[in-house]
Amino acid sequence: MARLLVGLVALAAAFYVYALVDCILFPRHRVRAVPKLAWVFIVLLFPVIGGVLWFLIGRGRKSSKRQVQYRTVGPDDDPEFLGALKADPVSDAQLRDLEEQFAENEDPDKRTDNGRTDR
């Protein structure tokens, strides 16, 4: 009988610690009935009963599939942002000019022995 009592006390202590830690770490916006600080005091003052009440009443459920869930989207994953991007004709023309200049400077016929171009 004493072993059973010791086992029940150990089980109650473990449940008390688990309920207290869960209550403290639970997100504030999902707590139901009373404010989170009140739940911490309820679990502290009434160890087993407070923990049971916390899990039955105070601990809110995860959001259901019906509720809108928002997530942050980076600009490279946002179709609206990517659709708003347009090719810049000025920079494209500048790029073509630079490529032509580079091709002219890299022409092997214009090179001298030291690697510089003749002009």
Image: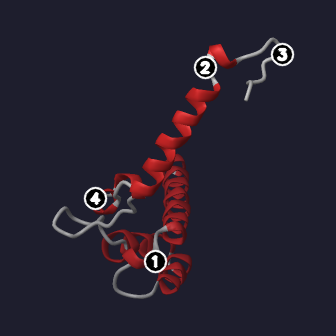
Pointer 4: residues within 10 angstroms few (<14), some, or many (20+)? few
Pointer 3: residues within 10 angstroms few (<14), some, or many (20+)? few
Residue type highlighted by circle 3: Asn
Going by the image, does 103 lie left or right of 115?
Answer: left
Residue 28, label in figure: 1
- From the top left corner, tell me how far across and down residue 27 is, in percent: 46, 71
Mark-to-mark CA distance, 3 and 2 = 14 Å
Whether tag 3 and tag 4 are in contact, CB under 8 A, the answer is no
Image point (51%, 55%), residue name: 5
Where 11 falls versus 53 (above or below)? above
- From the top left corner, tell me how far across and down residue 95 is, in percent: 50, 44
Where 67 falls versus 91 (above or below)? below
Mark-to-mark CA distance, 3 and 1 = 72 Å
Going by the image, does 14 lie left or right of 58?
Answer: right
Q: Nearer the viewer, mark 3 or mark 4?
A: 3
| Label located before the other in sequence (4 or 2) | 4
Whether tag 3 and tag 1 are in contact, CB under 8 A, the answer is no
Label 4: which residue? 83
Where 98 falls versus 78 (above or below)? above
Residue type highlighted by circle 1: Arg
Where 4 falls versus 13 (above or below)? above
Label 2: which residue? 107
